[in-house]
Image: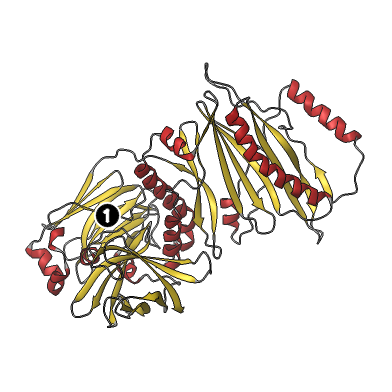
Amino acid sequence: MKTRTNAYLPILLVLPALLAGCGQTYSQPAEAETGPVQESQQETVRLQEEAEEEDTVILQEEETDTAVTALPLPEEEEGKAEVSVSEIFNKEGDALTQEGGEYHYAYHIPKIEDDTAAAAEINAKINSYASFAEECYDSIQSGEEPYLASITYETFQSGDVLSLLLSCTGYYDGSDSYDVFHYDTKKGECLENRDILSLSGMSDAEYGAALCRAEAAFFDDFCFPGWDLLNPDPGFYELRAQTLTYGNEDLSYPIWLDGDELHTIAKIASPAGEGFFFRDLLIRKEQETERKTAQLGDYLMAALQQDQVVLRLRQTERLKEILGDTIFLVDGDLFGKDLAVDGLYSSYEEIVCAEMGEERRPYVLLLTGEGRVEAIDVLSCLWGNYFCGSGPIPGISNGMKLVRGGDGSYDVTVLTEDGKEVSLCDSVFSLREVLTGSLTDSEWTGDMYDDTGTLRFLSFQGGNGEDIFVTASTGKDTELTSGTFRYLGTCEKGLVYSYCLETDEVLCGTIALNPVYDEESWDPVLLVTELGGTPLFGEQTGDETKLVRSFG
């Protein structure tokens, strides 16, 4: 259970939808019944009315139901310790900017009302926020603009655990920051985020997977409509990858329990220019679901269970025919074993395997609970020795059912809610050439030479409607190599591409590319993570190489 103080958190972003998505609205508490709290409020109002009126820019000071009297927490079960929260600083109202505009400010600083060393420790930490609030309010009183528009909090209760979530909003840029404090009201002890995760019953691995699902689900729901009719717009994929790479596996951002529900503050990549915004996400443990399977000929079996997909391939004559001259690129150890697919974060309703297009390339298609379609490019994954789902295919929404084509038709269609039948072939094939704006026509260079005196180098030159052309120097020899990249999907490491580069022998593998900015210089950098196959720059799977943009 939670209680909230009244607050106004302006987030100055371009998109109106984003303004609604990242601002936090705090509901006004219900009117208190007659009693000590109400009497205290009446006394506060009387004192304020008697106070000498000051010459200030304040337009109106709002009274809140929290005042400085202890706030009772939601009713506890019998036998639970009752601890209240009061406010040591409480100022809220409207004021004028130096240009004559009007803005709202709100400063509510909580205090845990309990006589223990742990409560005193938490209150001492919270007191630093009271100093910030006093400074900002003093600025308002003197006709200046504050550096923080608001400092507010929410209380959450789960059994004996009380959590205080503090949020600060910058006045000039609308940026948000958060802090959380946990207190065991029965034992009188401070708790950390790690303790809250243990109480939730989730392991680190379960939490990491659940967090990625929650981040992807929010991003897809929030941003997908903007790309719904585009086919495809690579910006969607880059922002989706950035959202997944932000993560919170180290629990550096607040987490808390509201009843039996686990929440966290997550960073979501913003479509309104560079940057991100914060969002309160509910983290749900994966639920058991019915196992669904699909088969393609005698060489491919796909199984869907608990929103995870596992593939199994057999090296039959039909698959050899499809692979043709590229069969030597495939690691023979991949056949006859379960192959887990990465990059799947949605809830899936249906799975279909099909050979598509004139090339009759094998694909696995997934219909999500939201009516979107995702794809797995089986051949590109085989060549790169890493399997990854594409994420939502732009242009496809409100799907109800996947339908394989009849004899002689190498296509899959999706039936939509409005009765349309939409072909997926062109949309699926176009995914291969997804190249985001940060990578298009760009060159990236390593910041040091290796023992051969060769600089690591990667250059993207666009594509031919099917593959992305690249030139690279791996740092392992003195020769420049060229070849192709194919987009597979997104994961927690970034945008996933399989590659085939020609040297003395063909070099095949899979990497994740994460375009970010250096934390110190703010120069564009490209983090390259080896995911499978023959490493491009590193020595083994998992190695990371940092490249700096030198052109583009």
Quarter-of-image position of residue 319: bottom left
**Residue at position x 44%, y 52% in the image:** 247
Measuring from the top left, give residue 460's x and y in whole percent: 37, 78
Please, what is the three-letter code of the amino acid marked with disc 1?
Val
**Residue at position x 56%, y 38% in the image:** 181
Residue 110, relative to residue 379: is it above or below? above
**Between 304 and 504, the one nearer to me in the picture:** 504
Quarter-of-image position of residue 275: bottom right
Q: Can the viewer see residue 7?
A: no
- Residue designated by label 1: 341
**Residue at position x 65%, y 51% in the image:** 169
The N terminus: image quadrant: top right
Quarter-of-image position of residue 446: bottom left
**Between 420 and 470, the one nearer to me in the picture:** 470
Measuring from the top left, give residue 382's x and y in whole percent: 20, 64
Q: Can the viewer see residue 107?
A: yes
Measuring from the top left, give residue 96's x and y in whole percent: 80, 54
As drawn, the residue found furthest toward the top would be: 78
The image shows a total of numbered marks equal to 1
Residue 505, relative to residue 529: is it above or below? below
**Between 255 and 100, the one nearer to me in the picture:** 255
Residue 106, relative to residue 406: is it above or below? above
